Image (cartoon, rainbow, N blue to C red):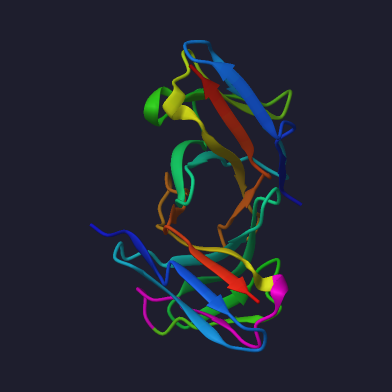
Amino acid sequence: NAGVTQTPKFRILKIGQSMTLQCTQDMNHNYMYWYRQDPGMGLKLIYYSVGAGITDKGEVPNGYNVSRSTTEDFPLRLELAAPSQTSVYFCASRGTGPNTGELFFGEGSRLTVL
Amino acid sequence: AQSVAQPEDQVNVAEGNPLTVKCTYSVSGNPYLFWYVQYPNRGLQFLLKYITGDNLVKGSYGFEAEFNKSQTSFHLKKPSALVSDSALYFCAVRGGGSQGNLIFGKGTKLSVKP
């Protein structure tokens, strides 16, 4: 049972380059999320999805884009990378039901923009 | 708006002593509260949650948390700390609306010395 899988684990980008962070989950969860983690700042929500074909902005969406064509996959696209996007990115998913609520996280993707 | 606060950036404890990591929350409606742990260069791991029921919640690795409605607190506790408990701990509250995301505190670094 792999859970939530993120690739790549590490990446260095030059300013202005673009890339996609991949996220896939095998738990058949409808809800998926992208967070970024910066030191001393906790985690901030970038985008989320409540099901295939449905996405919406979170707290810090500028400079990012997402798509959700399948239940399993939720890629995060960075266009025109900037140094401010240097961060650790976490993908998470959540099931539904009366006693659920916790998110399951991937291991993270560490991105540096130089 | 939902929010959580972790008033301590760092907590230092001697091995074998009890530990407490503090969290206070602000929500409209009933709170859904969570604790996560993050080891270096890893994703967040779920420890425990409070949704309803007993105010004392037991979780993974011997951790427990006490929900206190009058003080709007959800402190994480462990009777006897281990060196291996050293990590970054996050308190979180479920956000409002249908997206079900978690809103995280800034994190508390727990250091357990032998």
Residue at 58 percent of width and 63 percent of height:
A35
In the picture, the quarter occupied by the N terminus of chain A is bottom left
Range covered by the magenta-colored residues: A70-84
Relative side of B44 to B25, left or right: left
Q: Quadrant of residue A61?
A: bottom right
Counting from the top left corner in percent of width and height, residue A114 is at 65, 77
- Does B35 sit above or below residue A27? above
Res B100 visible: yes
Tell me the chief SS of the magenta region: loop
Residue at 54 percent of width and 40 percent of height:
B34
Q: Quadrant of residue B6?
A: top right
Counting from the top left corner in percent of width and height, residue A21 is at 48, 76
Does the magenta run of residues contain A81?
Answer: yes
Counting from the top left corner in percent of width and height, residue B78 is at 49, 19
- Does A42 sit above or below residue A34? above
Residue at 75 percent of width and 32 percent of height:
B7
The outermost residue toward the top is: B17
Q: Quadrant of residue B101?
A: bottom right
